[in-house]
Image: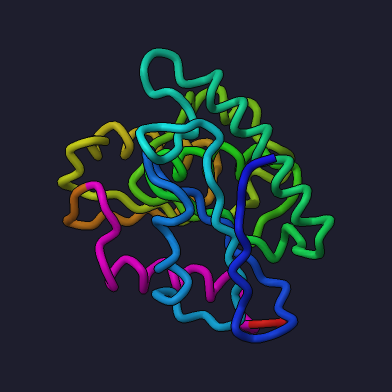
Amino acid sequence: MLESELIPAREKGSGRLMVMLHGLGDSMEGYRWFPEAMRLPWLNYLLVNAPDEYYGGYSWYSFAGDLAPGVARSRELLFELLDSQRSEGYATEKTVLGGFSQGCLMSIDVGLRYPHHLAGIVGISGYVCEPEKLVKEMSSVGREQKLLVTHGTRDPLIPIEGVRKQIQFLKQAGVQIEWREFVKEHTIAGEEEIMLIRDFVQMRFPSGGD
């Protein structure tokens, strides 16, 4: 099982959950600021470490050569993680899956294949592994999932042009994606982008807490 830590909602008894996946070389420690920044007192957060050690942090897959084997291994681990959250009382339909960079790729990859309906999927500054294969292997609820995907027009690590094409391909395949571009590099664009993510999450939970 993946190492994870639950940061409970300030409002007791909430079953709403956001799972946050970090980027390459980072860890759950890099997202401890996120719950406070989101300012949603009824939302629990599960911070997760990727399985492979990488220069003091962790990695979801090797980006050198073929990504697919590492992505598939991490997908299986994240399926197990989501299943375990279901067994602990966090229903999938009340769970948002989100991530940055490698975590974005994993959120899209897992979210569209997982056989249960998520509250939403958030992908920040990432890309898609084998979009054509992903469309073929989407779960029966894949086209019902709601996604917010953001990217920077000045991203030097993952140029936006290729990601635009991947997102357009997924949209044409019937995936429901809200795509937003920011004038930013490989980062989260401060309060402006956090506000967009917050609004998306609130729309997925229109009644707030349980």
The verdict on residue 162 being magenta is: no
Above or below: residue 69 compared with residue 111: above
Write down the region rendered in magenta: 186-208
At horizontal 38% and vertical 51% (from top left) the residue drawn is 124
Residue 47 lies in what quarter of the image? bottom right
The C terminus sits in image quarter: bottom right
Q: Position of residue 179 (x, y in %)?
A: 37, 53
Q: Who is closer to the viewer here, 18 or 208?
A: 18
At horizontal 35% and vertical 33% (from top left) the residue drawn is 55
Above or below: residue 54 compared with residue 112: above
Q: Of all residues shown, which one is farthest toward the right?
A: 87
Q: Of all residues shown, which one is farthest toward the top?
A: 65
At horizontal 26% and vertical 53% (from top left) the residue drawn is 187
Report if residue 33 is visible in the image.
yes
Q: Of all residues shown, which one is farthest toward the front?
A: 56
How many callouts does the rendering have?
0
At horizontal 62% and vertical 82% (from top left) the residue drawn is 208
Q: How is the model colour-coded?
A: rainbow
Q: Who is closer to the viewer here, 141 or 9?
A: 9
Q: Who is closer to the viewer here, 133 or 129?
A: 129
Report if residue 121 is visible in the image.
no
Residue 182 lies in what quarter of the image? bottom left
Q: Position of residue 4 (x, y in %)?
A: 61, 52
Locate residue 151 relative to residue 72 in the image: left or right.
left
Main SS class of the magenta portion in the image: helix
Q: Position of residue 54 (x, y in %)?
A: 40, 32
Above or below: residue 199 compared with residue 207: above
Locate residue 24 relative to residue 83 in the image: left or right.
left
